[in-house]
Image (spheres, grey):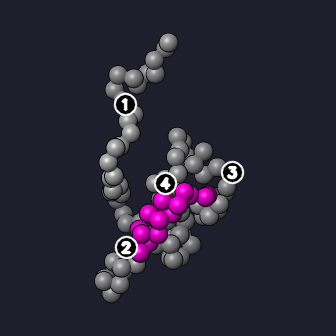
Amino acid sequence: AEQHSQYGSHRLCMQNKAVIPVLLGEAISGKDGREKEYENYCQCMMISFKPWSNLRCLKGKYNTWIEAFESEVFPADVTAIIHTMNIEKECKDVCDT
């Protein structure tokens, strides 16, 4: 059987312990911000929580990240993580004021 071109330099494995992803760069916009911020938020959530191999399949048939995110049905555990991230963001916003 022919091997993938990156067989020698890449590997795929299952994590057998819980990990917390750390997103680098600017902070994720809140879900309650302006439309541009909400578009960024939706894009970040889709990239973080929907399995994908290229951006075209990630966004699907939708024209905006908002449409794609709001149409996606995430498993309950993923929805709980997203909810917790939103609460953490709100708490940080309150502390910054």
Amino acid bearing label 2 = Glu
Q: Does the magenta stretch include residue 75?
A: yes
Q: Which of marks 2 and 4 is nearer the N terminus?
A: 4
Q: Distance between the residues labelled 1 and 3?
A: 30 Å
Which residue is under mark 2? 88
Percent across and percent down for residue 6 are: 40, 25
Amino acid bearing label 4 = Phe
Q: In this view, does 49 lie above or below 36?
A: above
Q: Distance between the residues labelled 4 and 1?
A: 20 Å
Query: Mark 3 Cα within 10 Å, few/some/many (few <14, many 20+)?
Result: few
Q: What stretch is highlighted in magenta?
A: 72-87
Which disc number belongs to residue 80? none
Please identify the quarter of the rendering in which residue 22 is found. Answer: bottom left
Q: Name the residue: 36% across, 63% down.
A: 26
Which residue is under mark 1? 11
Q: Is residue 77 left or right of residue 91?
A: right
